[in-house]
Image: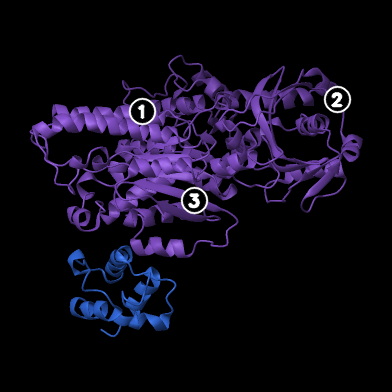
Chain colours: A blue, B purple
Amino acid sequence: MNEIQPRLVKCFQTVFPDLREAEIPSASQASVSAWDSVAAITLVNVVEDEFGIQMDFDLLPELDSFDRVLEYLQKEVV
Amino acid sequence: MWVTVTEALKILQSAPKEASADFEVLLACGFTPLHLQTFLAAHLQRHLRERWVRISTGLYGDLVGTIESLAGRPAQGAAIVLEWPDLDPRLGYRTSGSWGQEALGDILPAARAMLQRIGAAIERIPPGSKVAVCPPTLPLPPLFHTAGWQAGEAELELEQSLAEFCAAIGSRAGVLVVNSRRLAEESPPIQRFDLKSDLLTGLPYTVPHADAVGGSLARLLAPRMPKKGLITDLDDTLWSGIVGEVGPEGVSWDLASHQALHGLYQRLLASLSGQGVLVGIASKNDPAIVERAFQREDILLKPEHVFPVEVHWNAKSGSVERILGAWNIAADSVVFIDDSPMELAEVAAAHPGIECILFPKGDYAASHAVFRRIRDLFGKDRLSDEDALRLASIRQGAAFRQSGEDGAAPESFLQQVKAVVSFDFGLSTADPRVLELVNKTNQFNLNGIRYTEADWAAELAQTGAFLGVVSYQDKFGPLGKISVIQGRAAGDTLRVGTWVMSCRAFARRIEHQCLRVLFDRCGARQMEFALTPTAKNAPLQEFFRGVSGEKPEGPVVLTREQFCEKCPPLYHEVTERQENRSE
């Protein structure tokens, strides 16, 4: 489970290249201007690529911060 | 899938943001472009490593408006992606318009009218922009009365209107249409549509399909250079059997002998030759026997399709070396085909960069794959008059060199060839051969800079711009358009930014004639050449060493006096013309 966070940081770096690594754990849709609806879908695809899982578009409204995506992955990724 | 979303993003992040030139593409589609935009950009970026690819998009649901916007802000390229709802929203899933027979009576004429509007908008795109069009790729919604396995009248009418539209726009210079059948191989139709994504995000494509469409468009907008020459083996490749053992009448390539694979290969090579691909032969054989085989009336690859023919018992790498010399092209522009893995390995080791293909004798499926691969390697979007002349001019060049070596002194030989050098100084972007020559030539190329259609149009639009397109012929026949020189006049100086000449035209002093005509025509005191020495332009460097007296390290300034002092006697008849600008 400890491996999930650094892998998720990599995902955020891929989708939000202008975000500094230290800023990523506190990133949220409210704090990152580039995190629009297009970026949210792209983030889902990149997370799918990284973790080999399928995520549902219905989850998009809930996955609005790094913490929430991490929480989701900790439940879904074995 | 070629790349994932993650890989595509990483390709884009590694793009050279400080690149000397952008490659700007307008992506026109009626839906939310999302991953399609990412994949298109990534595939283009992979093709155009030295440029920074930038994609702009239009408004959701306004395909025609987006295409029309190109008239006011031309880009290097436009990727136009049609889907059925662009022709009528009722042909999609995101509107509540009714389906059914009554609606169809209205949908069909509306779709035809929209295709006309889209076609007219494409017509208005400035000629400098390259346009790639992807016809609808998604299944039609279930609005027809027929079962899905029956193509009903309305559906067929719709398909017919689309086919007519594609044929019309595809005939326009600079407009290229994605091959739907090839796309279907790479992205099976049943795996393309994502209804949930369509309804929730506005992108109707699955991720793999967005990747496939983006890749298809990128291949049209930034195509790789086609190969120029094909060298083939004979025994068990061009024909079935060992001609030295069974004799000229014993080898076969027809259906009756169950050896039609070889006949198909011959037909393909003859067709390529007709399109300007150079075809040569490298075979370990008795030349007299091979000559008799080529005299058979039923042979499909005729002797006139082939030059040169290297038939002897020495190593094939040597044969390839001589053929490359006769063609005057590099190994990386050539494909070598043989049924022997050992021969392929020997040639590959001696000529790095040459593309070696095993002829899979007796294997029908593998042969079909090879034929398709050959088509892809040599495919080009348009044929030019020069393509038809190429093989004849290579033969002509050999005859030219042979005559020069047959005892006549170079000066008297050059005097006798009745050479005519023709200059066209019209500032036109209409002839695709001109840019093709600029972008394909390596050896006599001032700096190796490659131009997009838009770059080229911008160069010609500059104040003081000039363009000289040079054609050549002599008593051995025409070489067609063989040189392009382009730049700007600034006061009494001509600044030459582009100068290329086909290697087929070497040793005729055409390069000297180019400069003499330019000096005379423009009354310039000097010329400045934006020369950059490259790994391949040694012949051009050698020319400048000859006229300036020193090996060039970078840009060269040549005065009229310097040139006149070093210019050898020229015996060409010169013609000049300047056609009106036509774009």
Label 1 chain ID: B
Query: What residue sits 29% from the left and 54% below the top?
Result: B208
2 or 1: tag closer to the N-terminus: 1
Q: Secondary structure at mark 3?
A: strand
- Name the image quarter holding the N terminus of chain B: bottom left
The three-letter amino acid code for the residue at tag 3 is Glu
Three-letter amino acid code of the residue under disc 1: Ala
Of pointers 3 and 2, the one earlier in the residue sequence: 3
Residue B411: mark: 2
Residue B534 visible in the snapshot: yes
Q: CA distance from mark 3 to mark 1?
A: 26 Å
Residue at x 32%, y 40% (from the top left corner): B182
Mark pair 3, 2: CA separation: 51 Å
Q: Position of residue B385 (x, y in %)?
A: 56, 24
Give the distance between the C-alpha atoms of the residues marked 2 and 1, in whole angstroms: 53 Å
Name the residue that disc number 1 marks. Answer: B167
Instruction: Locate residue B21, reporting x and y percent.
Output: 58, 54
Q: Which residue is mark 3?
A: B24
Q: How far across and how far down the image is residue B39, in percent?
A: 37, 55
Q: Residues within 10 Å of mark 3 (few under 14, many from 20)?
A: many
Left or right side of B3 for B142: left
Chain of the residue displaying label 2: B
Name the foreground residue: B415 vs B351.
B415
